[in-house]
Amino acid sequence: MQNNRIWEQVAGFMQQLRCESLSEKSVVQMPGQKKIQEELEKAQVKGEELLKQMQEKERGIIQEWLEQLENNASVEAQQAYCQGYVDCILLLSGMGLLRPELMSEGILEHIRQ
């Protein structure tokens, strides 16, 4: 439980850091990302039109599913972001640029897992 609390605090800090210090130079754009976003927008328009034709119960089920997909994607993105930080910490530590004793034991133990 202690590890979860630590990582929730670290994740919150990183989210705040990421949102406050974005500049065009520091934003990573994946190859094909813009095209995928455009295709998603087109599919969303078609999907919303179809949802309007569905009965309320069916529409509710699909909307709940879409919300869960969005929630899952958000959590996966945050996990990947945190993993990048962990990888950087491990890289710096492996290069001898970051002393492991400066990090809390809880974080080190979580990284080892």
Image: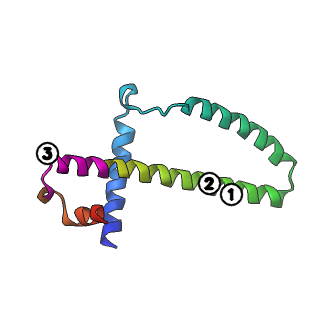
Which three-letter amino acid code belongs to the residue tagged 1? Trp
Q: Is residue 99 located in the magenta-colored stretch of the structure?
A: yes
Residue beneath label 3, please?
Answer: 97
Q: Which sits earlier in the primary sequence, circle 1 or circle 3?
A: 1
Q: Residue at x 72, y 34 (%)?
A: 42
- Quadrant of the rendering where the N terminus is positioned: bottom left
Label 1 element class = helix
Cα–Cα gap, marks 3 and 2: 39 Å
Q: Is residue 69 located in the magenta-colored stretch of the structure?
A: no
Label 2 element class = helix
Foreground of the two, 6 or 77 = 77
Check the image and report above or below for 23 versus 85: above
Residue 101 lies in quadrant: bottom left
Of marks 1 and 3, the one in the foreground:
3
In the image, taking residue 93 as reference, residue 16 lies left or right, namely right
Percent position (x, y) of residue 17?
A: 33, 43
* Label drawn at residue 69: 2
- Quadrant of the rendering where the C terminus is positioned: bottom left
Cα–Cα gap, marks 1 and 2: 6 Å
Which three-letter amino acid code belongs to the residue tagged 2? Leu
In the image, taking residue 27 as reference, residue 68 lies left or right, namely right
* Mark 1–mark 2 CB contact (< 8 Å): yes
Residue beneath label 1, please?
Answer: 65
